[in-house]
Amino acid sequence: MQLISHQLIWGNQQHNAFTDLIKFNGIYYCCFRQATNHVSKDGIIIILKSESLNSWQIASKIVITNSDLRDPKLTIHPSGKLLLSYYHKVFDSLGKNIINQNCIQFSQNGLTWSSAKMIGEKNWWLWRIRWHNNTALGIAYNRAQNRVKLYQGDPLAGFLLKKDDLFSLKQNSKGYPNESDICFLDDGRAICILRRDADTFTAQLGISNTSYQQWQWFDLNEYLGGPAILKLGNGKIIIAARRIQWPFRLSTWIFELNLADKKLIPLFKLPSAGDNSYPAMIEENGKVYVSYYSQHRILKNGDKPIKKQDKCAIYLASIAL
């Protein structure tokens, strides 16, 4: 694999971050959160569209008063609808956080959206939704509970708890599991990459049976922030994620997953520094396209630690297979 191009597709004086990327009805869509900074209370969702992956324009925005809309994700429902999921943090007039819930909306054209529907459980942060045989899986985390749950079903009809204790400090003796991604093997089994932010901070690889009730977990010996998985047409599995290298540097990397050995192979770093990562990937015409965010263009020293008040922009990388 080789990086062949890299372009800024959205940037302004806001904190633009937490991307997803999809092709829907022949058009490419990239969504992200725009706000004052990384943890402010004013997050909105912007959805860009492009016919060529070169020129991008706003297709739609999702804005809710007194709300922070975080970590938008796009997926295609078996019925052909485009689904947008996100975490909705609601604040009262005094700025107090009063409710947190997962929401989903659908669109027939990527331009106009249905009203929001709540899915999952309040205060359990549902991450990516992935489909297999017309059924979706998704993992939600709760920091106070120090564990993650697995949900299964159709988000537009019923997204039900599948496994209450998928991975936890109590069960696995490893703390603060949170962000995740899932992909499916040819035999129907699922694999999961699970971020952790406690003790050794090492991400976990989960491999399920086809019922998704029995999972084996393996330590990957790498910190992976905002992980995204892509199973390529040639059968290889790649991962894009934030990586920590010492002395303290954060950057977005592409890895290959050696599933037989349960090991990660670092391939290369994308242009990135400071507050960065939360990538998404699609494979198209012998290339992999990666959306992500970074602040490397505004940092004089690419090895500086995160400055959450600095502004971030959205980038698209093209990688030759």
Image (tube, rainbow, N blue to C red):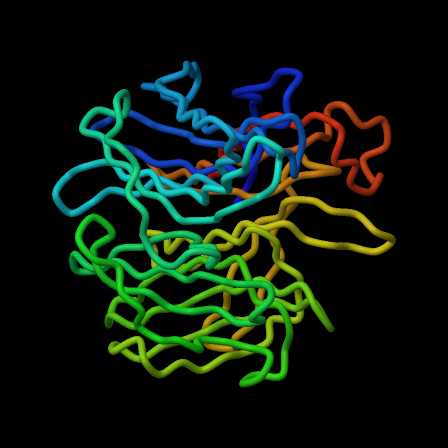
Where does the image place residue 35, in percent across and percent down from the top left?
A: 59, 27
Q: Nearer the viewer, residue 296 or 288?
A: 296
Q: Quadrant of residue 151?
A: bottom left
Residue 169 as seen in the image, left or right of residue 85: right
Q: Quadrant of residue 166?
A: bottom left
Where does the image place residue 5, in percent across and percent down from the top left?
A: 55, 27
Q: Residue furthest left?
A: 79
Q: Nearer the viewer, residue 47 or 281?
A: 47
Look at the picture and state if 181 lies above or below 313: below
Residue 13 as seen in the image, left or right of residue 4: right
Where does the image place residue 150, in percent across and percent down from the top left?
A: 37, 68
Q: Nearer the viewer, residue 181 or 142?
A: 142
* Label total for image: 0
- Residue beneath the point at 66% across and 61% down: 223
Q: Quadrant of the C terminus?
A: top left
Look at the picture and state if 146 lies above or below 170: above
- Residue beneath the point at 31% across and 42% down: 104
Residue 98 appearing in the image: yes
Residue 321 appearing in the image: no
- Residue beneath the point at 62% across and 16% down: 12
- Residue beneath the point at 55% across and 27% down: 34
